[in-house]
Image (cartoon, grey):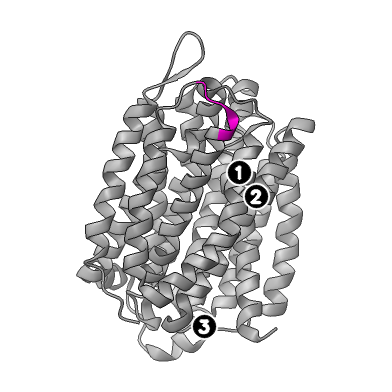
Amino acid sequence: MNREKLILWTLAAINFIHIVDFMILMPLGPQLMRVFEISPREFGLLVSSYTFSAGISSFFGAFFLDRFDRKQILLWVYIGFTVATLGCALSPSYSVLLMARVISGLFGGLTSALILAIIGDVVPDSRRGRAMGLVMAAFSVASVLGVPLGLFLASLSDWHTPFYILTLLSLVSLGMIIRFIPSIKDHLNQEAHRPHPVQVIKRVTSNSNQMRAISLSVMMMFGQFMIIPFLSPYNVANVGFTEMQLTYIYIAGGAFTIFTSPWVGRLSDRYGKLKVFSIFMALNVIPIGIITHLGVTPVPLVLLVTTLFFVTSNGRYVPAAAIITGTALPENRGSFLSFNSAIQQLATGLASLIAGLIIGESATGQLTNFNLVGYIAIFFSLLCIPLARRVKVVS
């Protein structure tokens, strides 16, 4: 296996753990709401706390990510992430778990930006779509293996167990970083004078192309994360799923996207990232509209719709990530992607929080107003298509 593939597989492993750490809380929603006796609003805060803190850390990370060797900064950030994940596993109450999620988000936000920056540094644009497809396939593996296994173990014991396993996997991935990620310093030689933090902000905000890329990230997050955190609670409360049956959603969706993610990456390189993005974004609104209007429904039909949701969601993100990454030059790619990650995480948290405020709970325990949330998500999703056409790739 050549050096580039080893790097990409290591980044995919890191991304897998990071994604499971973020995703596992959402399907655990019904159990956490029951154990801690919390409302949809409090659960929405638990989800958004991670993304808000990730956004804040990514913002400040923009001031220093381009000043250091990518490998060294990734190593230290991931050590912090591992310790914070252990803190989640040891949390005895809602308030402590909330605090642990905030700390996890502080390090998780920097991890996302670093992964994209390293891909941008080591993979040329001609192969970047394929590389993004491989690394983003971690989402699929997380869905088909990580999340269902975590839910299964949680149902056998309790919600703490998945976080203990994630801590052990994080230690393994730390070894992979040390072994396979090389020292990446070329970006340090391309700009001798490191600008003041205010200049870093101005450099991004004054670049209209990069601001359009950031706006695209925001619209995409609003289109998705008003839906995703409440997918599991809604299916349990309204559609008739058991907590164990939730694993079917992630197994089915993840199994398909394991194959479609690399395929979408190849399509992006062959036919154009913008064209592929537009097609999958348009298709994505179909399952959003259906999911948010379901009542009691047979399991196979629900799985068909949710699998389409996973496939199209992943299909729009692969080319979008390549487009957004390509709007920055190597010497300021880390700072731009950190800014983008910051705004993206804040948008994710805000979307979850707003959805939690809109969604109510009836006297019978069913969730209400999810259809309204669906209309808002569709509106933001469709806005992404014309916006993406105005984003230009420069590297």
Q: Report helix, strand or loop for mark 3.
A: helix
Instruction: Assess disc 2: are there few (<14), some (14-19) or many (≥20) residues with their C-alpha within 10 Å of its C-alpha.
Output: many
As for residue 208 lying within the magenta part, the answer is no
User: Residue 297 appears at what percent x and percent y?
Assistant: 52, 25
Q: Quadrant of residue 395?
A: bottom left
Amino acid type, residue under disc 2 in the picture: Val
Above or below residue 29? Residue 363 is above
As for residue 297 lying within the magenta part, the answer is yes
Q: Magenta region: which residues?
A: 296-300
Instruction: Give the side of residue 301 with respect to residue 190, left or right.
Output: right
Please tell me the numbered disc located at residue 250. 1
Amino acid type, residue under disc 3 in the picture: Val
Asked whether the viewer can see residue 157, the reply is no
| Residue ID for mark 2 | 144
Report if the CB atoms under discs 1 and 2 are less than 8 Å apart: yes
User: Residue 371 appears at what percent x and percent y?
Assistant: 36, 28
Q: Nearer the viewer, mark 3 or mark 1?
A: 1
